[in-house]
Image (tube, coloured by chain):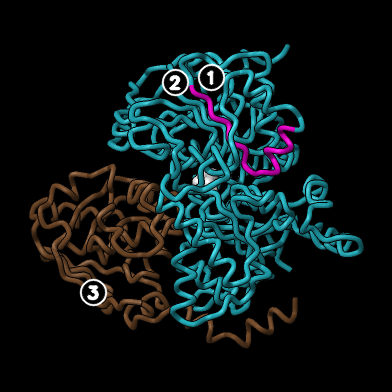
Amino acid sequence: MQPKTLYDKIWESHVVVPETDAPAIIFIDLHLIHEVTSPQAFDELRERNLRLRRPDLTLGTADHSIPTTTRTLVRSDDPLAYDQVTKLDTNCAEFGVELFGIKSDKQGIVHVIGPEVGATQPGKAIVCGDSHTSTHGAFGALAFGIGTTEVGHVLASQCLLQRKAKNFEVRIDGQLREGITAKDVILYVISQIGIGGGTGCVFEFTGSAVRAMNMDARMTLCNMSIEGGARAGLVAPDETTFEYLKGRPMSPRGAEWDKAVARWRELKSDEGALYDKQIVIDGSTIEPMISFGTNPGMSMPITARVPNAGNEELKRALQYMDLKPGEPLLDHPIDVVFIGSCTNSRMTDLRAAASILKGRKVASNVRAVIVPGSHQIKKMAEDEGLDKIFVAAGAEWREAGCSMCIAMNADKLEPGQYSISTSNRNFEGRQGPGGRTMLASPLTAAASAVTGKVTDLRRMLKR
Amino acid sequence: MTKLDRVTSRVVCFTAENINTDQIIPARFLKRIDKSGFGDDLFADMKPVEVFGIADARQRQIMLCGKNFGCGSSREHAVWALRDFGFRVLISTAFADIFKENSLKNGVLTVTLEPESHQQLVSEWQKNPDAEMTVDLEKQSIAFAGLSIPFTVNSFNRTCLLEGIDELGYILRHEEQIKAFEAAR
Ligand code: SF4
């Protein structure tokens, strides 16, 4: 039998009607919904008088347009956002969907809470009206973002029309050096293949550097697959995965757990499986990465200089960022540090930031905002005393949500401000109109918060 | 879904590469809970002169776009904004995956051409920016300034667009198979 990739296997196990001229119809095991991309889909159900086929496979949370300063919504603060979040409440109630709403102790960024409650599991097909659904691929689940029309399709049929993608192996060999995180790895990968490099593909991350990563790090890696153009990213499940999932509220229990793990162990690419594309990277050569432009592909080692503006796109980007070719980024002044988002808001990330901020102060010219990915993470961090470290350093410690990753609430940059952000998109205006974003790891962000300028975190590591 | 068979119109030529959906419609406009009116917010921050420098831009139904148009966020609002603004056909050398799906589902045709053909259209447009172009989905052909450029759209997508077939209806017609699949799990 022809050897198969992990993606081939998960795909095949979800085909309801095979692909012909028409795309395949595939079954979806978990549909995550949030306030921004679901209201029009629920309207569609109502208009067509359809039921929600599988409320038991649907899970909702509010994350994008909620404030992170309080858990009480006031309509006059932002009437549109208030109505959007309230609409999610009523839609979920009407159609019987479990909702981790703003007051729930399980609330959080949709891609943080899926794994946290154990709903995200190896081998599942998972979708959400959000491109960073790729995050869940860290568990060996086929997970990708869909549009609102497709959200409606899944609500009504628990199925999607899909064409099979190509296989793209991203192998990271070797061992990462001290201070190098999954964020640096994925920024490096995207800087190499470009933001369209993975279009039409599903990434599978392999190699010893990936095997050595914990689940938080693997989620960071898969999270930004879409930034490389791939709809999904995968890491084959292993002991690290099972360890993470064991005992979570929605994980299987008892004999069911053993059966599940036995099944999950089969979820890996066969020896000799063929990939359509491949890139092999020596992980030990990766340096701390930072973005200098207006898409994540415009990233470089933090010690490098801004490249020459070869094409129109780069010229425009440097103009927007007010940076000059040949200029180093090190020591460039910054105004804001944002640590959070579905890329870097989990315990590993917060601990990393705290390891730098402990006993240090945020520079007086910098506003540092730290936003945990979920209510559970907030609680855990507080149990460990991380919040005290952050507050003592002069950073703001917030409630869970998307916050300054997308600037749909009050958390945003002023025009012209520079931020170092642990989020995933440095697009023009992403963190507020006119705001200038530099993407980096939580370690780099924290180190730069302390000095008030772009800083090589390796200077601050404990010797 | 709205049908689409043939579109004849003047053309907007905006070929910057890697235009993302945050640029097409910034996130702060995504709070509305219906699908209409997003055209007013199209390219709200970017305001590209290629679009807004044209007096009749909202009457032009065809846009020549750059490579990897629609990358980034999955927000379907981007397509709602383009359609509401007036666009029915987008022509590029490559579209981002999710954006392409979203477009087809909203009756907006994405035509992917080889770079040479795309460049021919751009060159002709530069000579005469007010010339009319015809994009014929039935014949899978673009007519512009004496050029005739063939393109292909997958036959399923083509039929959906030509006949205004709704994909959800298509999926739901497979109820028996879905039921059987669920039962076997
Ligand atoms: S944190 Fe940012 S990227 Fe992640 S889901 Fe929220 S808005 Fe999207």
The span from disc 3 to disc 2 (Cα, nearest Å) is: 52 Å
Letter of the chain shown brown in the rendering: B
- Does dot 1 land on a helix, a strand or a loop? helix
Q: Are marks 1 and 2 in contact (CB under 8 Å)?
A: yes
Instruction: Please give the chain letter of the residue carrying mark 2.
Output: A
Q: Which residue is mark 2?
A: A334
Please name which of the two marks, 3 or 2, marks the residue nearer to the observer: 2
Tell me which amino acid carries mark 1: Ser
Which is more toward the observer, A418 or A107? Answer: A107
Q: Which circle marks residue B136 in the picture?
A: 3
> In the image, are marks 1 and 2 on the same chain?
yes
The mark tally for this picture is 3
**Left or right placement of residue A77 versus residue A115 in this view:** left
Q: Chain of mark 1?
A: A
Mark 3 chain? B
Q: Determine which quarter of the picture holds residue B1.
A: bottom left
Which residues, given as a range, are shown in magenta? Answer: A367-382
Q: Residue at x 66, y 84 (%)?
A: B179
Q: What residue sits 70% from the left and 29% below the top? A: A351
- Which residue corresponds to the image point at 51% horizontal and 22% vertical from the top-left? A302
Dot 1 or dot 2, earlier in sequence: 2
Residue to which mark 1 is pinned: A448
Relative vertical location of residue A97 with respect to residue A460 in this rendering, above or below: below
User: At label 2, which amino acid type do we have?
Assistant: Ile
In x, y percent, where is residue A124? 69, 63
- Residue A453, given in percent of the width and then of the height, sits at 48, 16
Return the residue nearer the eye: A366 or A154: A366
Q: Quadrant of residue A450?
A: top right
Q: CA distance from mark 1 to mark 2?
A: 8 Å
